[in-house]
Image: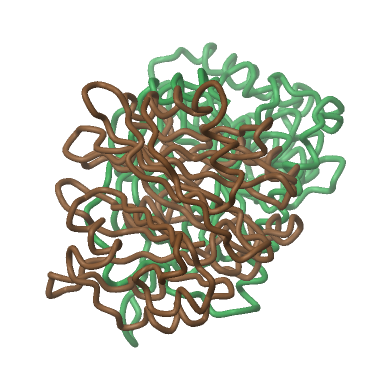
Amino acid sequence: MTMTETNMTPTKPGTSLMIGAEVWSPVDGSMVRQASTPSIGDLDQRICHGASHPVSDQIDTAGTSHLPQVIALEGLKLTALIWPIIDRGQTSSVVVLYLDTSDEAPLATELWTGRPGRSELCLSSSSYIKLDRFAKLSPYIAFPNGSGLPGRVWQTNLPQMEGDLTNSPTFMRSTGAQTEGLDIGFAMPCIDGSSLAAVALMLSGKTKSIARVYETWTPSQRGGSLRLSCNEGVYIEAPNTQKASRGLDVPAGDTWIGRAWATRQPEVVCDSSGNSLERSGSQDDQLTSGIAIPIIVLDDVAAVAVLMW
Amino acid sequence: MGQFGNSFVELDNLVKAYPNPRGDAIRVVDGFYSKIAEGEFVSVIGHSGCGKSTVLTMLAGLNEVTSGNIILAGKEVVGAGPDRAVVFQSPCLLPWMTAFDNVMLGVKQCYPKATRVEKRQIVEYYLALVGLADAMKKYPREMSGGMQQRVGLARAIALKPKMLLLDEPFGRLDSLTRMDLQETVLKLLDEHRITTMMITHDCDEAVFMSDRVIMMTNGPCAKVGQVLDIPFDRPRDRAEVLNHELYYDFRGCLIDFLEGQDHRRHGKPEVEEVEEEAPTIALTLQESPQIAEAYAVG
C-alpha cells in the first residue's frame, strides 16, 4: 500500500455526503493509490494519518475477488464503498468513495448480487445511517431483472439514478423512502466481462445528498464522443452544470470524463486552486470535486458514470 | 432464507399477450421471472387485473404462453397435466357426486393400476386429511363453502402433484373458515412438502403461509416488481407468527408496495423504463456460492 499527497479544498457546505474519492491500481503485486479527491480538510487526516489505511484489506479483497465492498467506518464517521474496475478479466483499478456520516443524515449503501437458485438480485452487504426500517427489511427483499433500481441496472448495464424516489414510478420501495426521508438514488453495475457481479445502490435525502451531480455518459451513435444518456442526470443545486451538460459532446480523451472513456480508468478531479473542473457551470455551482468511473461491458466502455460534489 | 436449494420450477421471461384489432398486441404479463425451489411455498400478490392468475394458468398449462419458458422438475411445461393440480376460488365440484366420488374421479385417472380397495383407501386418506372423514358421503349442496373447498383441496392433493397451484383458494370464505383452512393447507404441505404457488390479495395470508412473496406491478405489461423472503420456521403456528418481531414489517412492506402501485395507477403516467439507447447485451448474473461466502466473511 502506497499513498500520495492529497489536495484539500472546501466544498459547498452542508449539501453533499461524498467527501472524497480515491483510485488505487495494482503495481507490482500491491495496490497503490494513484489519485484522490478529498475535499474536506480533515478527511485526509481521518483516513491517512492513522497507523494504516482503514480499508486496505477491503481494497485488496475487492481487487482479488472482483467484488465490491461496503464498510461502515464508525470510528471515523465514514462509510466507504470500494469498487473494482474489471477490464478483460483483471482488476485494473479500485475506486474508494467516502461518505460522511458524522451528522447522521439518512444514507443507505447497499450491494445487490445473485444467489444460487434465485433469479433475483439479493442484498449481500449494506450500511445504513438513520434508516431503521430499510435496514430491517432490505435483507429480505429481492429484485428481478428490470425492477427497482438494481433490476434496472441489471437490465440496461448502465448506472441508474432517481431524483425523486417518493414519486418515482419505477422505485419499488417508494413508500418506505417517503417514510424515511429518502429522495435520491444512484445505482451502478460492477461487471466482470459478460456477467453482472454486483449492483451498488446508494440512497440519500435531498438536503444532504450523496453527491450534487449524477450523470451517465454513453458513446454517441456516431462514435467518437460521449453524450449525456437520455434523461440520465440528477442535479442538486447545480443548475449551471445541468444546463451546460445538455447536448454537450465530450470527445474521447477530452476532459476527465473523456479521459475515463479513452483510458478505461477512473478519473478524479479536485479543484484546489479555484479553477473550474473542466466543466462549464461547475464553478458557478461551487462544485469542487468529481469522479468519472468507466463501465466496461465485455471489451467496450459502455458508459461513464460521473459524480460531482 | 437460504433453506432451499436449486430451482425446481423456473419461469423464464414469461409473456402473455392478447391480439388487439386496433394495434399492437396487448401484453398483459411482460417478462415474469422466478425460480422456485422444491417444497417452497410462493405467493403472488398484486392488484386486481395485474395478471397474477394469468401467470398461474400459464404454469398450469391452461393458458398458452406467448413467449418464455416454464420448466418443472427439469422438463418444459407444455399443456395441462396431472403433475400440476389447481385449486380455484370456486371449488368446482360436480354437484351430482358425493365428496368421495368427486375425489375418486381424479384418483381413477392418476392411479390406473391401483386396485379398487387401494383407490378407496387413497380417497378416504385425503378426505380425512382435510377434516372430512365424517362427510364423505355428502353432496356439495349439503356442504358449506369451506367444506366444499376442502373437497377441492383433497381432490388436488390426492393426485400427488409435483406442484400445487392455488388461485385465491380462500377468497370466498368467511374469516374464521379462511383461517381454519389456511392451517389445514399448511399442515398438508408440512406432511407432503409439495411445491406450491398461491395467488392472493391478502397480505396477512401471504405472510403467514409463504416462504416467499412475489409482488407484481400493475398491468398491462405487469412483471415482478419485488420479492420478499419470509424466514419464519415451519411448521408455522399462527400465534408465533403474529408475535414475530418482523411480522408487521413484512406485512407493511407488502402494503407499501401495493400502495405504491396504487399511487402509480392513479398518479403520474408510467414512464418508459428502458432508455432507447440502452445496450442490449444481456448480462448473466453471477450467483456462485463464493459470492455469498465473500460477503458473509466481510
Give me the chain that's green. B
User: In terms of depth relative to the viewer, which is nearer, A244 or B165?
Assistant: A244
Evaluate whether residue A193 shows in this view: yes
Residue ID at (55%, 30%): A49
Left or right relative to B278: residue A210 = right
Residue ID at (22%, 53%): B281
Q: Quadrant of residue B3?
A: top right
Residue ID at (76%, 25%): B131
Residue ID at (70%, 43%): A129
Classify A230 as above or below B285.
below
User: In terms of depth relative to the viewer, which is nearer, A158 or B54?
Assistant: A158
User: In terms of depth relative to the viewer, which is nearer, B273 or A205?
Assistant: A205
Write down the colour of chain A: brown
Classify A14 as above or below B111.
below
- In the rendered image, residue A82, in percent from the top left (x then y), is placed at 44, 37
- Colour pattern of the rendering: by chain
Quarter of the picture containing the N terminus of chain A is top left
- In the rendered image, residue A212, in percent from the top left (x then y), is placed at 54, 65
- In the rendered image, residue A256, in percent from the top left (x then y), is placed at 29, 61
- In the rendered image, residue A153, in percent from the top left (x then y), is placed at 39, 54
Evaluate whether residue B95 shows in this view: no
